[in-house]
Amino acid sequence: MRLPRILIIAVAVVTMAGAVLADLVIPDLAAQHAFNPAWPPHAKFHDAQYMVMTVLLGLIGLVLALRPRRATLVPAAAVLATPWLGMVGALLFPGTATYDPEFAGRTVFVLGLHGQVFLAIVLLLALLVATAEVLRSAA
């Protein structure tokens, strides 16, 4: 049960810190988010809401993952998958994009995917592996 717990804890830490670092702390990335002068106050409100939400979901997932009972690992993975599935799902809405056009030259792509989307897929795969192992070992 060690690997699933380690994967889930790692995703929890990235979930708690990721949006805050990318949207508020790292200057080049924060310029595209919280400190983007082109964003109206309401957009910045929703960015702040997302940052607070990911910290809270990450914390809930971490608490569940650190509990000694195996039964809390699948709920932890579900909680932690929420913001990452939300990020991928947001691409289905009309008029959305992973970056603003003025930042096209400063946007990181990994294997042809926007860096955030790539990270979301990696973390979701880690949660899927962890969940599959927990369910397999319970059978």
Image (cartoon, rainbow, N blue to C red):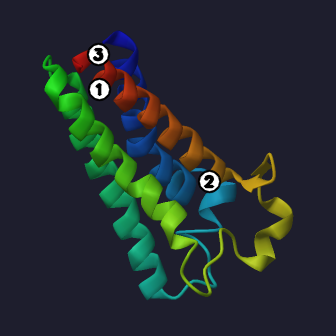
Rendered image: mark on residue 135: 1
Q: Amino acid at mark 1?
A: Leu
Residue density around tag 3, few if under 14, some if 14–19, many if 20 or more, within 10 Å? few
Query: Which of the two marks, 1 or 2, is nearer to us in this view?
Result: 1
- Residue appearing at x 50%, y 62% in the figure: 87
Indicate the position of residue 91 as horizontal and vertical percent values. 58, 72
Q: Dot 1, how many residues are within 10 Å of its Cα: few (below 14), some (14-19), or many (20+)?
A: some
Provide the residue designation for mark 2.
116
Give the Cα distance between marks 3 and 1.
6 Å
* Element at label 1: helix
Element assignment for label 3: helix
Compared to 26, does 125 lie above or below? Answer: above
Mark seen at residue 24: none
CB contact under 8 Å: marks 2 and 3: no
**Residue type, mark 2 in image:** Gln
Extreme residue in the front direction? 139
Q: Give x and y (percent) for residue 14.
A: 46, 38
State which tag comes first along the sequence, 2 or 3: 2
Tag 3–tag 1 contact (CB < 8 Å): yes
**Residue at the limit of the structure toward the right, as seen here:** 105
Circles 1 and 2: CB atoms closer than 8 Å: no
Disc 3 marks which residue?
137
Seen at 52% across and 37% down, the residue is: 125
Q: Nearer the viewer, residue 15 or 120?
A: 120
In the image, which is nearer the foreground, mark 2 or mark 3? 3
Q: Which quadrant holds the N terminus?
A: top left
Question: SS for tag 2?
Answer: helix
Q: CA distance from mark 1 to mark 2?
A: 28 Å
Residue type for callout 3: Ser
Tell me the residue at 32%/59% (across/down).
52
> Relative to 81, does residue 128 appear above or below in the rendering?
above
Q: How many marks?
A: 3
